[in-house]
Image (spheres, rainbow, N blue to C red):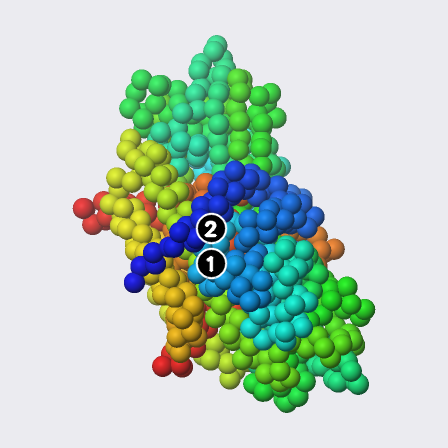
């Protein structure tokens, strides 16, 4: 079970690699993160021109038909270079949801702009006390004629300050923890009565707390069936996990090679660090962690591509295993780089922070271990 | 866990406890005292302890120490750290001070010790260099004798709070031909000397604690040499011994564990499976703390009988840092989605930070605590020390 890339997939990978090698080195990334928006619209345009924004979508939606394997390829390369542009939020999360549950009109309205790089999206599902539970929604949506009125707060919405559109989960019926009764809505980021408080994230992005005070949304902007938002979010999470695992694998691969290189070059006590057995064994464990992560990430992406029935359980398994593996690799990469690993100047700490972020997004390894166990 | 205290020691404990409660400055109670205080603010407690005569528990009475027993010193350490007070600047009081009164001459003692006690002089440590981390004996900063001066050239790094420092104590190479350990001297350098440049190093938590210190043709009076030329390694090892025994950090870990429990109780619903998971993990860490604390008390009891723990003290550094890292890791996990957020430095109340107040420093603490297993002799080095010096391997 090793994925042999098709010629088309190889082409996709090498075109991303070439672009990032030429345009997205660590200094460039640092400059991008330091700007007000924290990402580069110019690079975003280039990603669209390279076809990355259209890569995973079905041909019937106007996409390139690459599916989850295309996402995996893109995210892995993005992980290698710590790309901060909102591909995950816009293409994987929002684009995936729209393609999965959107009406034909909504797909036609929203997807072309995403594929052309003309619209940025974010997904607002979490709330202050929800932790990683999609059911735990207190934001409400009441129908008033041909529109819904949304009120409540959404937490830690990555990418919201940049976004043109938001997908917001809100309760149309049921009690605060009911699985049924959660619906999804497309909300304009500049909608009246929608208030954002922005903050910086650990990995250099921007996020926001959302306060909705009677935000009016046309009923035609409900995404998917009324009250069935949780199932849609669960499917979106499976795709999200597949993408985040691929990104983590890219980051781990870079950390491992940087650490290996450093341990050969850095001399203490008259010898290279890599000659110490305790450090050799540590790096062997980092190598094993990466190999296992690559395998599980491929396995998950193949299972999702062929719509295997146990895909969701496997997603939780991969989020757990890859999450712990990535954290081990990141912490040890910092440790083995010594003081340099702690410095903001070196890229190692930034991989560490991205991996810490990945481990929070859509549930930490402990959460998914429990979910995996419960699905057995 | 408590020592079996004599009635005098128990009275002393009560006195210390009451003094802290009555005198610890409220303005030092900020979310993250290590990063959020100005130089002046962080010296407030130092000055209060100085006026009380408690600033230097380790020092002999003749140099301004309080003349406490091993047990009293331990009680003081325990009470101050349980109360969450910011320890007085270690580089001054715990590190360079003892080197000066042990190996310095009378002029040096008179010149430097009173100003260390009063907090007038702020010291930083010029040990690490870009090429000398764990292998400290490989320092390359050169000091060449020129009449009654040394001319110093080199680059020190990871220098904690050098941005505030008046003085730096440096390991410098005075004999390039000798074996690495044999050619090192211990030199005190005025940070205002021409040729000293401090450049901030920002760490992954966004804070500015450490610096590069560049020394370019710095003229240092020869009278600032401690002890004998080329004997600096002996003094440096003496100083590192002081650093290691204070690293168990039981008080701090206990405090952060209590805080963690509070965050779990307020932020995680009891019927959430994560609640049980956190309670179990916290209990595991509590047992780790208990075991380390019991070991510390056992060693304190031995020390008061005159038995030196020697290199076994490395175990405090190893376990103390591993435990604290685990606590910061769990605290970061407990705040869930808000673990994505991090405060921006320098800290300002004007910047929005999401989530509950008690979670605002969780992310930066998790990141910052990665340094603990690296500095002061990495945990790998500490294990080597035990393997070699304790186990005889």
The label on residue A70 is 1
Name the spot of residue A371 as percent of width and height, x first.
43, 77
The label on residue B88 is none
**Of A296 and B243, the residue lying toward us:** A296
Q: Mark 2 points at which residue?
A: A12
Lateral position of residue A268 relative to residue B331, left or right: left
**Of A360 and B210, the residue lying toward us:** A360
> For residue A337, what is the image quadrant?
top left
What residue appears at the point 43 percent right and 53 percent down from the top-left corner?
Answer: A8
Same-chain status of marks 1 and 2? yes
Q: Earlier in the sequence, mark 1 or mark 2?
A: 2
Q: Which chain carries label 2?
A: A
Name the spot of residue B161 as percent of width and height, x first.
56, 40
Q: Mark 1 lies on which chain?
A: A
Q: Do the residues labelled 1 and 2 touch (CB within 8 Å)?
A: yes
**Of B302 and B221, the residue lying toward us:** B221
What residue appears at the point 43 percent right and 29 percent down from the top-left corner?
Answer: B171
Name the spot of residue B13 as percent of width and height, x first.
50, 63
Total marks placed? 2
Q: Judge whether B246 appears above or below B18 on screen.
A: above
Q: Residue furthest top?
A: B147
**Label 2 crowd bin: few (<14), some (14–19), many (20+), radius 10 Å:** many
What residue appears at the point 55 percent right and 67 percent down from the top-left corner?
Answer: A60
Name the spot of residue B1 as percent of width and height, x first.
41, 69
């Amino acid at each position: 079970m090793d994925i042999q890339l098709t010629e088309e997939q190889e082409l996709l990978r090498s075109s991303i690699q070439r672009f990032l090698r030429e345009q997205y080195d660590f200094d460039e990334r640092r400059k991008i993160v330091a700007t007000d928006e924290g990402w580069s619209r110019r690079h975003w345009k280039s990603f669209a021109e390279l076809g990355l924004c259209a890569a995973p979508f079905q041909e019937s939606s106007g996409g390139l038909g690459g599916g989850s394997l295309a996402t995996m390829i893109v995210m892995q390369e993005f992980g290698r270079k710590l790309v901060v542009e909102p591909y995950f939020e816009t293409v994987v999360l929002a684009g995936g949801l729209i393609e999965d549950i959107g009406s034909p009109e909504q797909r036609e309205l929203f997807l072309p702009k995403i594929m052309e790089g003309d619209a940025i999206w974010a997904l607002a599902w979490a709330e202050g006390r929800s932790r990683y539970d999609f059911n735990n929604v207190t934001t409400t949506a009441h129908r008033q004629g041909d529109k819904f009125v949304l009120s409540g707060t959404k937490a830690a919405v990555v990418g919201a300050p940049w976004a043109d559109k938001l997908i917001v989960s809100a309760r149309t019926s049921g009690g605060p923890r009911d699985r049924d009764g959660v619906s999804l809505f497309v909300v304009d980021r500049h909608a009246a009565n929608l208030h954002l408080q922005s903050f910086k994230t650990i990995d250099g992005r921007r996020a926001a707390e959302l306060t909705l005070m009677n935000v009016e949304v046309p009923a035609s902007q409900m995404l998917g069936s009324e009250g069935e938002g949780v199932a849609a979010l669960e499917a979106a999470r499976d795709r999200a996990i597949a993408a985040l695992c691929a990104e983590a694998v890219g980051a781990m691969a870079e950390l491992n090679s940087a650490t290996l290189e450093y341990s050969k070059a850095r001399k203490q006590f008259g010898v290279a660090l890599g000659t110490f057995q305790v450090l050799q064994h540590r790096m062997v464990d980092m190598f094993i962690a990466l190999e296992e992560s690559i395998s599980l990430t491929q396995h998950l992406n193949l299972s999702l591509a062929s719509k295997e029935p146990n895909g969701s359980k496997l997603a939780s398994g991969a989020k757990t295993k890859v999450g712990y593996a990535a954290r081990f690799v990141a912490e040890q990469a910092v440790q083995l780089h010594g003081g340099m690993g702690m410095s903001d100047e070196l890229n190692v700490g930034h991989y560490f922070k991205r991996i810490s972020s990945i481990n929070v997004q859509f549930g930490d390894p402990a959460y998914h271990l429990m979910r995996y166990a419960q699905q057995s | 866990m408590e020592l079996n205290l004599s009635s005098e020691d128990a009275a002393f404990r009560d006195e210390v406890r009451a003094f802290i409660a009555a005198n610890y400055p409220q303005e030092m109670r900020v979310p993250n005292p290590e990063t959020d205080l100005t130089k002046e603010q962080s010296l407030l407690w130092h000055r209060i302890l100085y006026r009380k005569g408690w600033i230097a528990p380790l020092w002999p009475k003749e140099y301004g120490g309080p003349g406490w027993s091993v047990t009293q010193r331990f009680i003081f350490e325990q009470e101050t750290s349980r109360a969450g007070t910011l320890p007085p600047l270690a580089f001054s009081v715990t590190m360079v001070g003892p080197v000066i009164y042990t190996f310095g001459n009378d002029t040096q003692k008179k010149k430097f010790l009173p100003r260390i006690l009063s907090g007038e002089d702020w010291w930083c440590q010029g040990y690490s260099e870009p090429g000398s981390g764990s292998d400290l004996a490989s320092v390359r900063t050169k000091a060449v004798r020129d009449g009654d001066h040394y001319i110093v050239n080199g680059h020190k790094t990871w220098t904690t709070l050098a941005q505030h420092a008046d003085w730096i104590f440096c390991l410098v190479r005075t004999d390039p031909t000798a074996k690495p350990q044999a050619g090192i001297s211990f030199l005190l350098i005025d940070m205002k000397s021409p040729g000293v440049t401090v450049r901030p190093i920002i760490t992954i938590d966004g804070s500015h604690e450490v610096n590069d210190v560049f020394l370019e043709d710095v003229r240092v009076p020869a009278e600032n040499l401690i002890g004998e030329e080329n004997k600096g390694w002996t003094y440096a090892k003496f100083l590192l011994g002081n650093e290691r025994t204070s690293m168990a950090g039981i008080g701090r870990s206990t405090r952060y564990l209590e805080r963690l429990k509070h965050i779990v109780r307020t932020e995680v619903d009891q019927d959430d499976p994560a609640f049980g998971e956190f309670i179990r993990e916290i209990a595991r860490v509590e047992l780790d703390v208990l075991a380390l604390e019991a070991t510390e008390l056992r060693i304190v009891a031995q020390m008061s009988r005159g038995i030196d723990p020697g290199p076994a003290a490395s175990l405090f550094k190893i376990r103390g840092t591993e435990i604290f890292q685990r606590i910061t890791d769990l605290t970061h996990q407990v705040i869930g989605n808000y673990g994505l957020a991090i405060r921006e430095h320098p800290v300002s109340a004007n910047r929005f930070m999401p989530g509950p107040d008690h979670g605002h420093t969780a992310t930066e603490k998790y990141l910052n605590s990665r340094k603990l297993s690296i500095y002061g002799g990495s945990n790998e080095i500490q294990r080597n020390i035990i393997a070699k010096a304790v186990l005889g391997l």
